[in-house]
Protein backbone atom coordinates (compact mmCIF):
# COMPACT_ATOMS: atom_id res chain seq x y z
CA UNK A 1 0.00 0.00 0.00
CA UNK A 2 1.19 3.50 -0.72
CA UNK A 3 1.87 5.81 2.21
CA UNK A 4 2.35 9.54 2.48
CA UNK A 5 6.14 9.04 2.06
CA UNK A 6 5.78 6.97 -1.11
CA UNK A 7 5.55 9.68 -3.75
CA UNK A 8 7.39 10.29 -6.99
CA UNK A 9 8.41 13.67 -8.35
CA UNK A 10 7.45 14.98 -11.76
CA UNK A 11 8.54 18.34 -13.14
CA UNK A 12 6.57 19.97 -15.95
CA UNK A 13 6.53 23.26 -17.84
CA UNK A 14 3.55 25.57 -17.97
CA UNK A 15 2.13 26.34 -21.42
CA UNK A 16 -0.48 28.53 -23.05
CA UNK A 17 -3.40 26.52 -24.44
CA UNK A 18 -3.66 27.20 -28.17
CA UNK A 19 -5.98 24.50 -29.45
CA UNK A 20 -5.57 21.08 -31.06
CA UNK A 21 -3.03 22.25 -33.65
CA UNK A 22 -0.65 23.39 -30.92
CA UNK A 23 -1.18 20.08 -29.08
CA UNK A 24 -0.23 18.13 -32.20
CA UNK A 25 2.97 20.18 -32.54
CA UNK A 26 3.85 19.38 -28.94
CA UNK A 27 3.37 15.66 -29.51
CA UNK A 28 5.52 15.72 -32.64
CA UNK A 29 8.22 17.41 -30.56
CA UNK A 30 8.07 14.61 -27.97
CA UNK A 31 5.89 16.28 -25.34
CA UNK A 32 2.53 15.42 -23.80
CA UNK A 33 0.06 18.25 -23.11
CA UNK A 34 -1.81 18.22 -19.83
CA UNK A 35 -3.95 20.23 -17.42
CA UNK A 36 -3.76 20.51 -13.63
CA UNK A 37 -7.12 20.88 -11.84
CA UNK A 38 -8.45 21.09 -8.32
CA UNK A 39 -8.13 23.11 -5.16
CA UNK A 40 -8.87 26.79 -4.91
CA UNK A 41 -6.50 27.63 -7.76
CA UNK A 42 -7.27 27.99 -11.44
CA UNK A 43 -6.52 25.13 -13.86
CA UNK A 44 -2.97 25.20 -15.21
CA UNK A 45 -2.02 23.93 -18.67
CA UNK A 46 1.37 22.25 -18.86
CA UNK A 47 3.60 20.16 -21.07
CA UNK A 48 5.88 17.29 -20.04
CA UNK A 49 8.49 15.20 -21.82
CA UNK A 50 6.72 12.04 -23.03
CA UNK A 51 9.53 9.68 -22.01
CA UNK A 52 9.85 11.24 -18.56
CA UNK A 53 6.12 10.99 -18.01
CA UNK A 54 6.00 7.37 -19.16
CA UNK A 55 8.86 6.34 -16.85
CA UNK A 56 7.44 8.26 -13.89
CA UNK A 57 3.98 6.69 -14.19
CA UNK A 58 5.49 3.21 -14.58
CA UNK A 59 7.35 3.47 -11.27
CA UNK A 60 5.20 5.85 -9.25
CA UNK A 61 2.64 5.32 -6.51
CA UNK A 62 -0.80 6.91 -6.46
CA UNK A 63 0.47 10.33 -5.35
CA UNK A 64 2.87 12.42 -7.43
CA UNK A 65 4.76 15.47 -6.20
CA UNK A 66 4.21 17.75 -9.18
CA UNK A 67 6.60 20.62 -9.74
CA UNK A 68 5.77 23.36 -12.23
CA UNK A 69 8.84 25.33 -13.25
CA UNK A 70 8.69 28.70 -11.56
CA UNK A 71 5.48 27.90 -9.60
CA UNK A 72 6.41 25.56 -6.75
CA UNK A 73 5.09 22.04 -6.22
CA UNK A 74 2.02 20.24 -4.87
CA UNK A 75 0.78 16.65 -4.38
CA UNK A 76 -1.40 15.40 -7.23
CA UNK A 77 -3.05 12.23 -8.49
CA UNK A 78 -3.82 11.19 -12.04
CA UNK A 79 -7.36 12.19 -12.95
CA UNK A 80 -7.49 10.92 -16.53
CA UNK A 81 -5.16 9.70 -19.27
CA UNK A 82 -6.05 9.77 -22.96
CA UNK A 83 -4.15 7.24 -25.07
CA UNK A 84 -3.80 6.70 -28.81
CA UNK A 85 -6.24 3.93 -29.84
CA UNK A 86 -3.58 2.03 -31.82
CA UNK A 87 -0.16 2.75 -30.34
CA UNK A 88 -1.31 3.23 -26.74
CA UNK A 89 0.93 6.29 -26.38
CA UNK A 90 -0.23 8.99 -23.96
CA UNK A 91 -1.93 11.80 -25.88
CA UNK A 92 -3.06 13.94 -22.94
CA UNK A 93 -3.07 13.79 -19.16
CA UNK A 94 -5.19 15.48 -16.49
CA UNK A 95 -3.85 15.78 -12.94
CA UNK A 96 -5.77 16.69 -9.78
CA UNK A 97 -4.43 18.64 -6.82
CA UNK A 98 -5.07 16.88 -3.52
CA UNK A 99 -4.73 17.49 0.18
CA UNK A 100 -3.08 14.66 2.05
CA UNK A 101 -5.56 15.03 4.95
CA UNK A 102 -8.73 14.80 2.80
CA UNK A 103 -10.19 11.60 1.38
CA UNK A 104 -10.70 11.30 -2.36
CA UNK A 105 -12.10 8.70 -4.72
CA UNK A 106 -9.77 6.85 -7.05
CA UNK A 107 -9.78 3.86 -9.42
CA UNK A 108 -7.54 0.93 -8.49
CA UNK A 109 -6.67 -2.23 -10.43
CA UNK A 110 -7.79 -5.61 -9.00
CA UNK A 111 -4.93 -8.13 -9.08
CA UNK A 112 -6.05 -11.78 -8.72
CA UNK A 113 -3.39 -14.23 -7.50
CA UNK A 114 -3.42 -18.02 -7.20
CA UNK A 115 -5.37 -18.50 -10.44
CA UNK A 116 -3.29 -21.46 -11.63
CA UNK A 117 -3.91 -23.52 -8.48
CA UNK A 118 -7.64 -22.77 -8.12
CA UNK A 119 -9.55 -26.12 -8.06
CA UNK A 120 -11.92 -24.94 -10.78
CA UNK A 121 -9.01 -24.07 -13.08
CA UNK A 122 -7.10 -27.30 -12.34
CA UNK A 123 -10.22 -29.23 -13.32
CA UNK A 124 -10.17 -27.57 -16.74
CA UNK A 125 -12.31 -24.50 -16.11
CA UNK A 126 -11.45 -20.97 -17.22
CA UNK A 127 -11.31 -18.01 -14.85
CA UNK A 128 -12.85 -14.86 -16.33
CA UNK A 129 -12.09 -11.58 -14.59
CA UNK A 130 -15.17 -9.45 -15.21
CA UNK A 131 -14.12 -6.43 -13.14
CA UNK A 132 -10.51 -5.27 -13.46
CA UNK A 133 -10.81 -1.91 -11.69
CA UNK A 134 -12.78 -0.77 -8.65
CA UNK A 135 -13.51 2.66 -7.22
CA UNK A 136 -12.28 3.32 -3.70
CA UNK A 137 -12.29 6.17 -1.21
CA UNK A 138 -9.23 6.89 0.92
CA UNK A 139 -6.68 9.50 1.92
CA UNK A 140 -4.28 10.12 -0.98
CA UNK A 141 -1.44 8.52 0.94
CA UNK A 142 -3.50 5.39 1.66
CA UNK A 143 -4.44 4.65 -1.96
CA UNK A 144 -2.93 1.23 -2.78
CA UNK A 145 -1.13 0.47 -6.02
CA UNK A 146 -3.44 -2.55 -6.53
CA UNK A 147 -6.11 -4.52 -4.68
CA UNK A 148 -4.87 -8.12 -4.43
CA UNK A 149 -7.11 -11.11 -3.80
CA UNK A 150 -6.25 -14.82 -3.58
CA UNK A 151 -8.55 -17.02 -5.70
CA UNK A 152 -6.66 -20.28 -5.09
CA UNK A 153 -9.75 -21.72 -3.39
CA UNK A 154 -12.31 -20.87 -6.10
CA UNK A 155 -14.21 -23.94 -7.32
CA UNK A 156 -15.62 -24.66 -10.79
CA UNK A 157 -18.79 -22.63 -11.30
CA UNK A 158 -17.78 -20.33 -8.44
CA UNK A 159 -18.25 -16.55 -8.51
CA UNK A 160 -16.18 -13.92 -6.72
CA UNK A 161 -18.06 -10.79 -5.58
CA UNK A 162 -16.64 -7.43 -4.53
CA UNK A 163 -17.98 -8.01 -1.02
CA UNK A 164 -15.48 -10.87 -0.65
CA UNK A 165 -12.45 -8.64 -1.27
CA UNK A 166 -10.64 -7.32 1.79
CA UNK A 167 -10.15 -3.56 1.65
CA UNK A 168 -6.73 -2.37 2.88
CA UNK A 169 -6.63 -0.33 6.06
CA UNK A 170 -8.10 3.14 5.51
CA UNK A 171 -9.72 2.15 2.22
CA UNK A 172 -13.45 1.88 1.47
CA UNK A 173 -14.99 0.33 -1.63
CA UNK A 174 -17.46 2.64 -3.36
CA UNK A 175 -18.89 0.20 -5.93
CA UNK A 176 -21.87 -2.14 -5.34
CA UNK A 177 -20.81 -5.04 -3.05
CA UNK A 178 -22.65 -7.45 -5.39
CA UNK A 179 -20.40 -6.48 -8.31
CA UNK A 180 -19.04 -9.66 -9.94
CA UNK A 181 -15.24 -9.59 -9.95
CA UNK A 182 -14.52 -13.01 -11.46
CA UNK A 183 -16.00 -16.45 -12.11
CA UNK A 184 -14.82 -19.88 -13.25
CA UNK A 185 -16.71 -21.35 -16.20
CA UNK A 186 -16.49 -24.74 -17.88
CA UNK A 187 -14.46 -25.11 -21.06
CA UNK A 188 -16.02 -25.94 -24.43
CA UNK A 189 -14.77 -29.54 -24.12
CA UNK A 190 -16.50 -29.93 -20.76
CA UNK A 191 -19.72 -28.51 -22.21
CA UNK A 192 -19.52 -30.92 -25.16
CA UNK A 193 -19.10 -33.84 -22.75
CA UNK A 194 -22.12 -32.69 -20.76
CA UNK A 195 -24.16 -32.34 -23.96
CA UNK A 196 -23.15 -35.85 -25.05
CA UNK A 197 -24.36 -37.24 -21.72
CA UNK A 198 -27.65 -35.34 -22.02
CA UNK A 199 -28.16 -36.63 -25.58
CA UNK A 200 -27.46 -40.17 -24.45
CA UNK A 201 -30.06 -39.84 -21.70
CA UNK A 202 -32.55 -38.45 -24.22
CA UNK A 203 -31.97 -41.42 -26.57
CA UNK A 204 -32.56 -43.89 -23.74
CA UNK A 205 -35.68 -41.96 -22.75
CA UNK A 206 -37.03 -42.11 -26.31
CA UNK A 207 -36.33 -45.84 -26.59
CA UNK A 208 -38.49 -46.72 -23.58
CA UNK A 209 -41.87 -45.58 -25.05
CA UNK A 210 -41.08 -47.45 -28.29
CA UNK A 211 -40.75 -50.73 -26.39
CA UNK A 212 -44.02 -50.04 -24.57
CA UNK A 213 -45.68 -49.38 -27.93
CA UNK A 214 -44.52 -52.73 -29.26
CA UNK A 215 -45.92 -54.50 -26.20
CA UNK A 216 -49.16 -52.57 -26.65
CA UNK A 217 -49.44 -53.83 -30.21
CA UNK A 218 -49.16 -57.44 -29.06
CA UNK A 219 -52.17 -57.12 -26.76
CA UNK A 220 -54.74 -56.40 -29.53
CA UNK A 221 -53.31 -59.32 -31.49
CA UNK A 222 -53.93 -61.63 -28.56
CA UNK A 223 -57.40 -60.14 -28.14
CA UNK A 224 -58.12 -60.72 -31.79
CA UNK A 225 -57.04 -64.31 -31.44
CA UNK A 226 -59.31 -64.65 -28.43
CA UNK A 227 -62.22 -63.22 -30.34
CA UNK A 228 -61.50 -65.59 -33.18
CA UNK A 229 -61.42 -68.55 -30.81
CA UNK A 230 -64.60 -67.38 -29.14
CA UNK A 231 -66.29 -66.90 -32.48
CA UNK A 232 -65.31 -70.40 -33.51
CA UNK A 233 -66.67 -71.82 -30.25
CA UNK A 234 -69.96 -69.96 -30.69
CA UNK A 235 -70.15 -71.13 -34.24
Image (tube, rainbow, N blue to C red):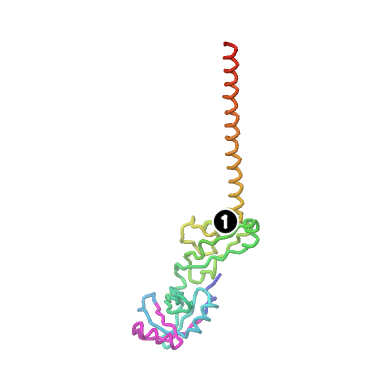
Residue 161 at x, y percent in the picture: 53, 56
Residue 34 falls within the magenta-colored stretch: yes
Q: Nearer the viewer, residue 166 or 90?
A: 90
- Viewport quadrant of the N terminus: bottom right
Q: Nearer the viewer, residue 90 or 49?
A: 90
Q: Is residue 131 above or below residue 226?
A: below
Check the image and name the residue furthest to the top: 234
Residue lying at 36% horizontally and 79% vertically, measured from the top left: 43
Residue 92 at x, y percent in the picture: 42, 79
Q: Quadrant of residue 39?
A: bottom left
Residue lying at 57% horizontally and 54% vertically, measured from the top left: 158
Q: Which residue is mark 1?
A: 185
* Number of dots carrying numbers: 1
Residue 221 falls within the magenta-colored stretch: no
Check the image and name the residue furthest to the left: 18
Q: Is residue 221 above or below residue 17?
A: above
Residue 152 at x, y percent in the picture: 63, 59
Q: Is residue 54 above or below residue 217?
A: below
Secondary structure of the residue carrying numbered label 1: strand
Check the image and name the residue furthest to the front: 235
Q: Which residues are magenta?
A: 9-36
Q: Is residue 94 left or right of residue 190?
A: left
- Local crowd size for mark 1, using a 10 Å CA cut-off: few (<14), some (14–19), many (≥20): many
Q: Nearer the viewer, residue 37 or 21?
A: 21
Residue 230 at x, y percent in the picture: 58, 14
Q: Quadrant of residue 225?
A: top right
Q: Nearer the viewer, residue 77 or 71?
A: 77
Q: Is residue 224 above or below residue 140?
A: above
- Viewport quadrant of the C terminus: top right
Amino acid sequence: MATTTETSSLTVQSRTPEGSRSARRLRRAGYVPGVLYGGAEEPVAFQVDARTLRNTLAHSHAVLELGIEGAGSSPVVVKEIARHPVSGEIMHIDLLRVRMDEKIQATVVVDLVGVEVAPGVKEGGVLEQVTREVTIEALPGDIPDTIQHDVSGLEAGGTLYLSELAAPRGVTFVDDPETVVASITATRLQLEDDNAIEQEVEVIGEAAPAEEGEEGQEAPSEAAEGEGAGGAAEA
